[in-house]
Image (tube, rainbow, N blue to C red):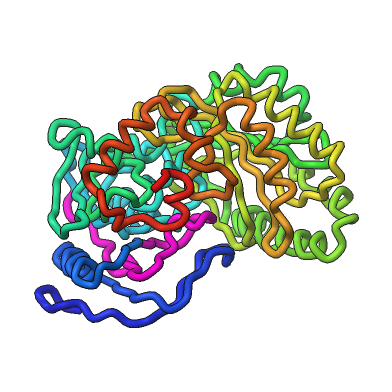
Amino acid sequence: MKSGVDPKPRMANWANWAGNQQVDGVSLFMPRSEEELQQVMQFAETNNTRVKVVGSGHSFTAIALAESVLIDLTNYDSVIALEKIANTVTVQSGIQLSKLNLFLHSNGKAMQNLGDIAYQTIAGAISTSTHGTGVNFTGIANQVVALRLVLADSSVVECSAISNSELFECARVGLGALGIISTVTLQVVPAFNLAVIEQPMRVDELLEDLDNHIAMNDHFEFFWVPHTGWALTKRNNRTHEPANPMGKLSHWYSKTFMENYAFGAVCMLGRARPSLIPKLAKALPASGRTEYSDASFKVFTSKRVVKFYEMEYAIPREACVEALNRVRRLVLDSGFFLNFPVEVRFTAPDEIPLSTASNRESAYIAVHIYKGMDFVPYFRAVEAVMNSYQGRPHWGKLHFQNAESLAPRYPKWQQFQVVRDRFDPKRVFTNSYLETVLGK
């Protein structure tokens, strides 16, 4: 398509990264400009169809599944402006975090915190409340200082904390329900390095002193290995020292071979013979202590080759130890064979209505199942534990909640509903998933 020319869709099929969500025979558009986004909305209005937008497909839920019109942002991924003095960057919404990170680094800037993958688009990351770890740091959406949205009537609106502020507050974690995010302006920081210590620990000893581990490190996370008494810990701390990265061979062996290809082979064997999983799990904590330092974006994010299904819940930080111990007992008593570690992270609170950290300091407990294995029994059992703590599911990860169960868990739930009714009263941007989790 060229700007100024009516868009012509093509019929296409689409599937997400994990392959558990797919749709056939939708009208696909791949715009390159904001004007073309508007033209797609005019097409949708003329044809009375609903619209969904996809980035790189890293959500496990059906949040991006289109019923009629699908907008793919692959070609809408440019950097628009970098303001070095103000420390802001404005980008098209389809830019992947990996591309944005490289651009920022080359200009002496960085995002202050990131999740553990960089394949997501910025729009997808903020819309689903993607976060990293660090008790003094919030999720990615809270780094947003301005947005441009294309609305259902194809008009464009700018919003920030001082302009259309109510829309801005909600659209930072908007689930794709308010409009198409066209551009995102982020608050960034001067580039920085992270000093890393990766080390296995006995999980009981770790949990006994968890508050100190969280408080004494800028970015602390750990992975409990089911069927063992071990956790793999990762401490990332900001440093003014020069980077001292792993050697190329060590990095390849640790991060590519062991964490992806060797682990993938173990998962395949476990899927074929689940009874072997407890024995295979005992090899994971044997890596020993590793120390290195590198540019922040290289440390925060990791390569992901092994495909899986994931569920993640945000709970009050103070409930973390009790909740994780209940999950450990559940695994021990249930007979589940689990070949993925349970990931635990921490963030500061924010005030975004549908952020998983809205108005509370949070711990995140994430569980995974290797692709092709039945995730439902395990995920339902873990979700039952998280419900005890008013757990909030990551919007892009699997769960079994609905609007009725979710509404009491968000203090600003109704604020979002009011904004949604105002900006998308005809529900042009909804689908079955959103009808389930937000209501009709």
Q: Report the number of numbered marks.
A: 0
Q: Is residue 72 magenta?
A: yes
Q: In this view, does 115 lie above or below 68?
A: above
Q: Which of 221 and 166 is in front in this view?
A: 166
Horizontal and vertical percent for residue 245? 52, 47
The range drawn in magenta is 53-81
Q: Is residue 379 visible?
A: yes
Q: Residue at horizontal 29%, vertical 67%?
A: 49
Q: Which of 392 and 249 is in front in this view?
A: 392
The quarter of the picture where residue 102 lies is: bottom left
Horizontal and vertical percent for residue 376? 70, 52
Q: Can residue 89 be seen in this view?
A: no
User: Going by the picture, which residue comes out furthest to the left?
Assistant: 4
Q: Residue at horizontal 42%, vertical 59%?
A: 64
> What is the magenta segment's predominant secondary structure?
loop
Q: Please give left or right for residue 408 compared with residue 419 in the image.
A: right
Q: Please give left or right for residue 218 compared with residue 368 in the image.
A: left
The quarter of the picture where residue 189 lies is: top left
Q: Is residue 213 above or below residue 307?
A: above
Horizontal and vertical percent for residue 154? 16, 60
Q: Residue at horizontal 50%, vertical 65%?
A: 16
Q: Quadrant of the N terminus?
A: bottom left
Q: Please give left or right for residue 220 compared with residue 149 in the image.
A: right
